[in-house]
Image (cartoon, rainbow, N blue to C red):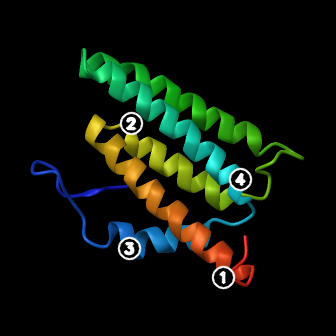
Amino acid sequence: MEFYQNRESKILRPGLFDSEAKKDADQVQGIQSSQFRNYFHELRALEARFEREAKGNPQVAFAKLIPQLELLKAKLAYGQRKNGPLQNAGGFVNLMNRLIDAGKRSPEDFEAMMQYLEAVLAYFYAKEGQNQGGRR
């Protein structure tokens, strides 16, 4: 996944947080909002640790982040096992794998990935609220 219209200027693509995030949110099925939120919070924790460590040496901090992102992919795979909490959430797992792979390219891509995932989560919640008659 490409986040940038102009990578050099760090200009994100138009529609990324609108039509594309809505489309991805619509494809996320078979997962409860609490499960989505748990993975999002795990990524937020990695983001906070990266930001703390990046103040000293950004390259080393990012090098430490990549294995943690790869571990999250392994956790997603484990969740898809028979009778696992993600066994019917292939769309979510595919989305997360695609985003994690893109986020591993650079610190800027990781930041854009987090923003994109936040937009997808917001649209997912909005869709969930509509499906429940506005209640959560």
Secondary structure of the residue carrying tag 1 is helix
Report x, y in % for residue 12: 23, 59
Marks 1 and 2: CB-CB under 8 Å? no
**Residue visible at 72% across and 57% down in the picture:** 89
Where is residue 11, by image quadrant?
Answer: bottom left
Mark positioned earlier in the residue sequence (2 or 3): 3
Is 36 left, or right, of 5 in this rendering?
right
Upstream in sequence: badge 3 or badge 1: 3
- Binning the other alpha carbons within 10 Å of mark 2 as few (below 14), some (14 to 19) or many (20 upward) gives some
In three-dimensional space, the C-alpha distance between marks 1 and 2, rounded to whole angstroms, equals: 34 Å
Quarter of image, res 41: top right
Q: Which residue is mark 2?
A: 104
Kind of residue at disc 2: Lys
Q: Which residue is mark 3?
A: 18
Q: Residue at x 42, y 34 (%)?
A: 47
Q: Earlier in the sequence, mark 4 or mark 3?
A: 3
Residue highlighted by disc 1: 130
Q: Looking at the image, is mark 2 or mark 3 nearer the viewer?
A: 3
For label 3, count other residues whose C-alpha is less than 10 Å away and answer few (under 14), some (14-19) or many (20+).
Answer: few
Classify mark 2: helix, strand or loop.
loop
